[in-house]
Image (cartoon, grey):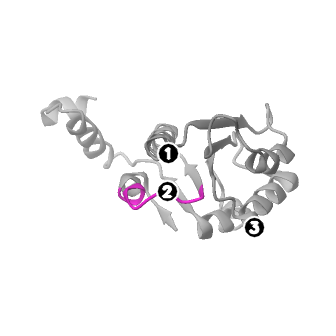
Amino acid sequence: MRVTPTVLSAQLEKGLVGAYILFGAEPLMLEEAADQIRTVARQAGIDEVRSMTAGVDLDWSELNGSSRSLSLFSTRRLILIRLPTGKLGDSGSKAIMTYLDEKVEDTILVVIAGRVDKRGQSSKWFKAIEKEGLAIEARALTHDQLPRWIEQRLKSRGIIATAGAIHRL
């Protein structure tokens, strides 16, 4: 299922799913969505978080190995994978598909992809995550949406601002 970051908290109240793909043009919204997932996971007793970045410290064979291996300290874990380019490549796609096919019960996969083009969104791995889990799309805010977004963020932190102050921000 595909949702926006604004309704993610309502989805998380229903419980965690096995896989998440966070993508879009707003990095701040993506990071905040990832933080929400981590917070709910921690509240659900998931203490172990394994974070990897494609192209830096990620060997795709590790994904399935780490999801199968037992931990000494935690029975459940969260695997967070960052895709700076928004693309997996063949080995990444195969690893994600294998992971999803195995339906690992004690592990939650979170992929933060940034911008993913239409071709990427129609790929097998992306569709599989969207079907099995949750896709969170953070679209770019338009000039008209920005003041309302700023106002909502300020209100959520207990700050009431005038219209002039919001437009100035």
Identify which residue, 73 or 139, lies in the foreground.
Answer: 73
Q: Quadrant of residue 104?
A: bottom right
Q: Amino acid at mark 3?
A: Asp
Residue 4, image x, y percentages: 43, 57
Identify which residue, 132 or 104, lies in the foreground.
Answer: 104
Q: Amino acid at mark 1?
A: Ala
Q: Is residue 51 above or below residue 16?
A: above
Q: Which disc number belongs to residue 16?
A: 2
Residue 23, image x, y percentages: 57, 51
Q: Gap between marks 3 and 1, in whole Å? A: 22 Å
Of the residues under marks 2 and 3, which one precedes in the sequence? 2
Instruction: Give the side of residue 155 with respect to residue 108, left or right.
Output: left
Element on which disc 2 rests: loop
Q: Which disc number belongs to residue 13?
A: none
Q: Amino acid at mark 2?
A: Leu
Instruction: Give the side of residue 44 with respect to residue 7, left or right.
Output: right
Of the residues under marks 1 and 2, which one precedes in the sequence? 2
Pointer 2: residues within 10 angstroms few (<14), some, or many (20+)?
A: some
Q: Which residues are magenta?
A: 10-19
Q: Quadrant of residue 168?
A: top left
Residue named by callout 3: 101
Q: Tell me the residue at 28%/29% (across/down).
A: 169
Residue named by callout 1: 41
Q: Is residue 94 above or below residue 111?
A: below
Element on which disc 3 rests: helix
Q: Are marks 1 and 2 in contact (CB under 8 Å)?
A: yes
Element on which disc 1 rests: helix
Q: Gap between marks 2 and 3, in whole Å? A: 18 Å
Outermost front residue: 72
Magenta span includes 101: no
Residue 79, image x, y percentages: 66, 44
Q: Gap between marks 1 and 2, in whole Å? A: 7 Å
